[in-house]
Image: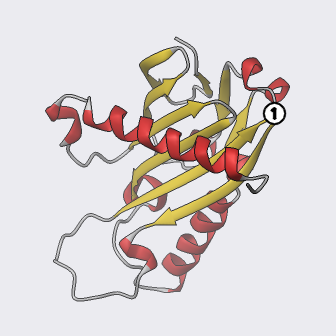
Amino acid sequence: MSPSAPLHRAVLALLIASLALLTTRPAAAQTAPHQHGVMRLEIAWQGRALTLQLEAPLDSLLGFERHPRNAAEREAVQQMLQTLRQGQALWQPDEDAGCRLRDVQLASPLLQPEGPGAPGQHLDLDASFSFECERPDRLGGLQQQLFQRFARLQRLQVQIAGPTGQHRQELQRPATRIALRS
């Protein structure tokens, strides 16, 4: 067995817990309308693994939600992607927990070559941030810097599944702390 096998099992269990969290939400929450200025964050925490799944309308990140049309918009996309890829600058789990960012994944139609797309299409971006925590028993929350990095963001809807159960929070600008324990 490789040294990373326990971590892979923990991540798999975390993903299963995340799916359970998604399927237990009310139907209205699963089909929530696309809202500018609002991002959704799902946090799954099990053992040493902490995973954050962010869903954001591109308007909340860029001010437009289509493929860029000029050099200034292409530069704005590159800056946004660079900011998101530096997940440790966006998310700071409690220092005593010894969490380290392990992976960042970004997905969006924006990252694909522009196709014929429907006029008026509203593009989103999904981001996944995976952390491994040395002392998860000391993890009570995390600081987020989304409001500071993305001026158009007004609200962050958070759903958390962890060792103490499931709960929701809603942060409004300028709040920064997400409590992981209910």
Q: Residue 131: horizontal and vertical position, in percent? A: 68, 44
Q: Nearer the viewer, residue 9 or 158?
A: 9
For the residue carrying disc 1, how many other residues have a C-alpha within 10 Å: few (<14), some (14-19), or many (20+)? Answer: some
Query: Under tag 1, what secondary structure?
Result: loop
Q: Nearer the viewer, residue 93 or 83?
A: 93
Looking at this rendering, what residue extends furthest in the top direction?
182
Q: Nearer the viewer, residue 40 or 47?
A: 47
Q: Is residue 42 above or below residue 138?
A: below
Quadrant in which the N terminus appears: bottom right
Q: Amino acid at mark 1?
A: Glu
Q: Residue 147: horizontal and vertical position, in percent? A: 57, 40
One can see residue 154 in this view: no
Q: Residue at x 31, y 37 (%)?
A: 22
Left or right for 87, reference 54: right
Q: Residue at x 36, y 41 (%)?
A: 19
State how many labels appear.
1
Q: Is residue 46 above or below residue 35?
A: above
One can see residue 126 in this view: yes
Task: Please give the residue where the numbered disc 1 appears in the rendered image.
Answer: 134
Q: Residue at x 26, y 29 (%)?
A: 24
Left or right for 147, reference 125: right
Q: Residue 37: horizontal and vertical position, in percent? A: 38, 44
